[in-house]
Image (cartoon, rainbow, N blue to C red):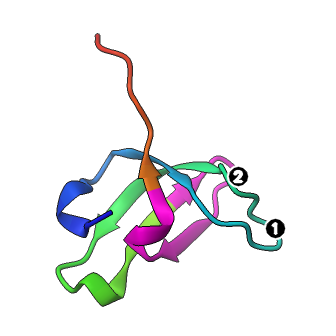
């Protein structure tokens, strides 16, 4: 996924497995950086803020309101 497809407030799901962060973890994007190499900052339900490269994230479908 390209950073330009992500926006602050978007819900994303991880597409990788990491100790302490299982594949499929859902969080909210809080920062999108201009440089693709800087990744995006994602806040997870447990309060952790983690910087993740955008290619390791998938957008979560959000219901229409």
Is 62 on the left or on the right of 17, as rendered? left
Residue 27: percent from left, percent from top: 53, 50
Is 40 on the left or on the right of 50, as rendered? left
Say how many tags the image has: 2
Q: Are marks 1 and 2 in contact (CB under 8 Å)?
A: no
| Residue at the extreme top | 65
Is 42 on the left or on the right of 6, as rendered? right
Q: Specify the quadrant of the image occupied by residue 23.
A: bottom right
For marks 1 and 2, the one nearer the N-term is: 1
| Residue at the extreme right | 19
Query: At 33% across and 63% down in the image, what residue appears?
Result: 1
Q: Which residue is mark 2?
A: 46
Q: Is residue 30 on the magenta stretch?
A: no
Which numbered disc covers residue 20?
1
Q: Is residue 54 on the magenta stretch?
A: yes
The region drawn magenta spans 43-57
**Structural distance between the alpha carbons of marks 1 and 2:** 11 Å
* Quadrant the C terminus occupies: top left
């Amino acid at each position: 996924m390209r950073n330009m497809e992500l926006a602050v407030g978007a819900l994303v799901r991880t597409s990788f497995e990491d100790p302490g962060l299982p594949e499929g973890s859902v969080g909210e994007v809080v920062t999108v950086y201009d440089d693709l190499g800087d990744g995006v900052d994602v806040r997870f339900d447990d309060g952790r803020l983690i910087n993740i490269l955008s290619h390791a994230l998938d957008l979560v479908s959000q219901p229409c309101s």
